[in-house]
Image (cartoon, rainbow, N blue to C red):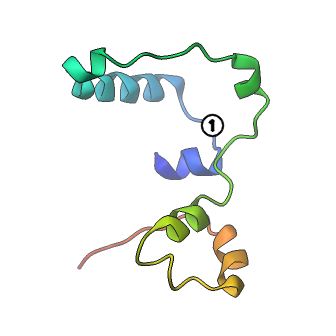
């Protein structure tokens, strides 16, 4: 699901709602009930491009260990990175 969100692929609304309900149920405790949410203007959201541009570049730069070793020449390559997976043997 992460890859689809990052790349802006269309997701099934039912899957998103099911995931939201699942996470809301997990977080539903006394502290969660105290959180106040402000209304959002939907027009702003509708006009934004889909996906998360340069997600992996931002994620790696903000990592305390990896961010220190990323050089300027690496940024252009990482900006175009689409997905990262790890398979453990």
Occupied quadrant, residue 82:
bottom right
Q: Give x and y (percent) for residue 58.
A: 58, 62
Q: Give x and y (percent) for residue 64.
A: 42, 72
Position of 40 with respect to 83 (left or right) is right
Question: Can the viewer see residue 28?
Answer: no
Vertical order, 7 against 79 (above or below)? above
The residue under the point 46% across, 28% down is 16
Q: Give x and y (percent) for residue 40.
A: 63, 17
The residue wearing badge 1 is 10
Vertical order, 65 against 54 (above or below)? below
Position of 67 with respect to 78 (left or right) is left
Work out whether residue 69 or residue 14 is closer to the camera in this orientation and state it: 69
Vertical order, 68 against 79 (above or below)? below
Q: Hey, which residue is sitting farthest left in the picture?
A: 29
Label 1 SS: loop
Position of 23 with respect to 48 (left or right) is left
Work out whether residue 31 or residue 84 is closer to the camera in this orientation and state it: 31
Q: Give x and y (percent) for residue 26.
A: 23, 28
Q: Residues within 10 Å of mark 1 (few under 14, many from 20)?
A: few
The residue under the point 65% across, 44% down is 8
């Amino acid at each position: 699901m992460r890859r689809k969100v990052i790349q802006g692929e269309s997701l099934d609304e039912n899957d998103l709602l099911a995931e939201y309900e699942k996470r809301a149920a997990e977080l539903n405790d006394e502290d969660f009930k105290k959180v106040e949410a402000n209304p959002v203007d939907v027009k702003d959201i509708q006009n934004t491009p889909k996906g998360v541009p340069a997600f992996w570049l931002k994620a790696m730069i903000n990592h305390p260990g990896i961010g220190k070793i990323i050089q300027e020449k690496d940024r252009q390559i990482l900006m175009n990175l689409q997905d990262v997976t790890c398979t453990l043997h």
